[in-house]
Image: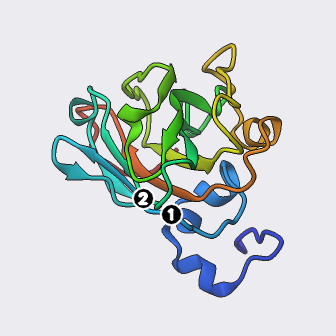
Amino acid sequence: MAAERFPGETTSMFKNPLVVGRVIGDVLDPFTKSIELRVVYNNREVNNGCDLRPSHVINQPRVVIGGDDLRTFYTLLMVDPDAPSPSDPNLREYLHWLVTDIPATTGANFGQEIVCYESPRPSMGIHRLIFVLFRQLGRQTVYAPGWRQNFNTRDFAELYNLGSPVAAVFFNCQRESGTGGRRH
């Protein structure tokens, strides 16, 4: 079975872990990273595709955002496109966290948490938890959605004129007793 291709997709994109992990495609359109985004749980930095258990992600992570101008603000969101299970993601995407008005060069704790952090608790399969960072047009220009389930990152970005993401990173998470295996 041939791999599904997306408009503008090139062979070199397959080296991008966001493409390999189907973050590009399932949640985001192709974009160019333009700012540093570091996500750290209990002194363990999230690298694309790493595995973290629910016990490692109970508390919200420390998030550091790059940039050089405190007058530039960012929106950070955390979504699970595999809820409630990768084989039947009928709640795709599930919004775990939303922080707005984060000044460049700071972190999520300097922004406005408008949807509080909810730790992932996958019950079936391996879930991708994705952090996406957008540059805002100004302060107080992004508002909370009415619900967490069936959130859509693309629609949210369009609604608030956020444009393409400026950074993203994801990790895999499965129930504590899970042993890996297939995503389905």
Q: Are marks 1 and 2 in contact (CB under 8 Å)?
A: yes
Farthest-out residue, left? 43
Establish if 18 lies above or below 175: below
**In the foreground, 122 or 109:** 109
In the picture provided, is 106 more to the left or to the right than 89?
left
In the picture provided, is 83 more to the left or to the right than 147?
left
- Per the image, the residue denoted by label 1 is 35
Q: Quadrant of residue 14?
A: bottom right
**In the foreground, 179 or 41:** 41
Residue lying at 79% horizontally and 38% vertically, measured from the top left? 155
Q: Is residue 53 visible?
A: yes
Image position, residue 84 (x, y; %): 54, 27
Image position, residue 123 (x, y; %): 40, 26
| Label 2 crowd (10 A; few <14 / some 14-19 / many >=20) | some
Please tell me whether mark 2 sits on a helix, a strand or a loop. loop
Image position, residue 116 (x, y; %): 45, 19
Image position, residue 172 (x, y; %): 39, 48
Residue lying at 56% horizontally and 28% vertically, measured from the top left? 95
Kind of residue indicated by mark 1:
Ile
**In the foreground, 141 or 157:** 141
Residue lying at 71% horizontally and 31% vertically, measured from the top left? 141
Please tell me whether mark 1 sits on a helix, a strand or a loop. loop
Work out whether mark 1 precedes mark 2 in sequence or the reverse, and give the earlier one. 1
Farthest-out residue, bottom? 11
Q: Is residue 78 visible?
A: no
- Per the image, the residue denoted by label 2 is 66
Kind of residue indicated by mark 2:
Gly
Establish if 120 lies above or below 130: above
Q: Quadrant of residue 140?
A: top right
Q: CA distance from mark 1 to mark 2?
A: 6 Å
Residue lying at 36% horizontally and 25% vertically, measured from the top left? 119
